[in-house]
Amino acid sequence: MPATSLSVPSVLDLAAHLDLVGHEVGISSWHLIDQRRIDAFAAATEDHQFIHVDPERACAETPFGGTIAHGLLTLSMLPAMVYEVMPRVAGERMGINYGFDAVRFVAPVRAGRRIRGRFVLQSMAERAPGQWLRTTGVTVEIEGETRPALVAQWLGLSVVG
């Protein structure tokens, strides 16, 4: 079934979640990735590679025309985006980031650009009583560009009951 974007409430029962499998659940708002955010990420991660934090050098020595965001900064924006669009399971006591089956950084995000996430619920499987493993396909788009910043399969565990 092709993905179609849906308008969903912020909380759904389990049966409604299962009905969402195979559908694009939502598209987040745009998030600005400016130099201030890139610099803060560099400080937090101690990754000060010049392509991220030195606009003059990045302009002169890279094909990007300036600084670019760390790929991991782009990835770290996913929680902000997913909270905007992905419904919680009714009765969920907690949600746990379970990791990623795949992450690919497809195109660089230049400083000053905006990104948004598209989320497709790919599967929902019961791992144990009251524990549901959700696989979400994610594409992070860069405003005005045809290639996405990243694509990923994101795993989340919902503990219900």
Image (cartoon, rainbow, N blue to C red):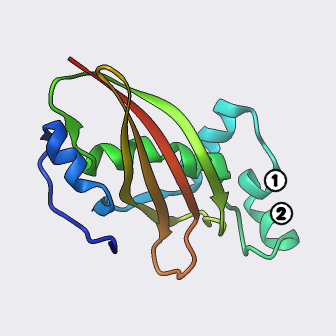
Q: Position of residue 101 (x, y in %)?
A: 60, 45
Residue drawn at point x = 22 percent, y = 43 percent: 87
- Res. 57 mark: 2
Task: Say which amino acid is labelled 2.
Answer: Arg
Question: Could you give the CA–CA distance between mark 2 and mark 1, rounded to whole angstroms?
Answer: 7 Å
Please indicate whether residue 160 sits to the left or right of residue 3 in the image: left
Q: Secondary structure at mark 1?
A: helix
- Of mark 2 and mark 1, the one earlier in the sequence is 1
The C terminus, quarter of image: top left
Label 2: which secondary element: helix
Look at the numbered discs 2 and 1 and tell me whether their residues touch, using CB distance below 8 Å: yes
Counting labels gives: 2
Amino acid on which disc 1 is placed = Phe
Residue behind mark 1: 50
Left-right relation of 63 to 89: right
| Quarter residue 47 falls in | top right
**Looking at the rendered structure, which numbered label has been put on residue 114?**
none
Residue drawn at the location 33% of the way across and 61% of the way down? 22
Residue 35 placement, left or right of 89: right
| x then y, percent, for residue 70 | 67, 51
Within 10 Å of disc 1 (Cα), the crowding (few <14, some 14-19, many 20+) is some
List the single residue furthest toward the right: 61
Residue 45: quarter of image: top right
Residue at the spot x=48%, y=40% of the render? Answer: 155
Residue sitting at 32 percent across and 72 percent down? 1
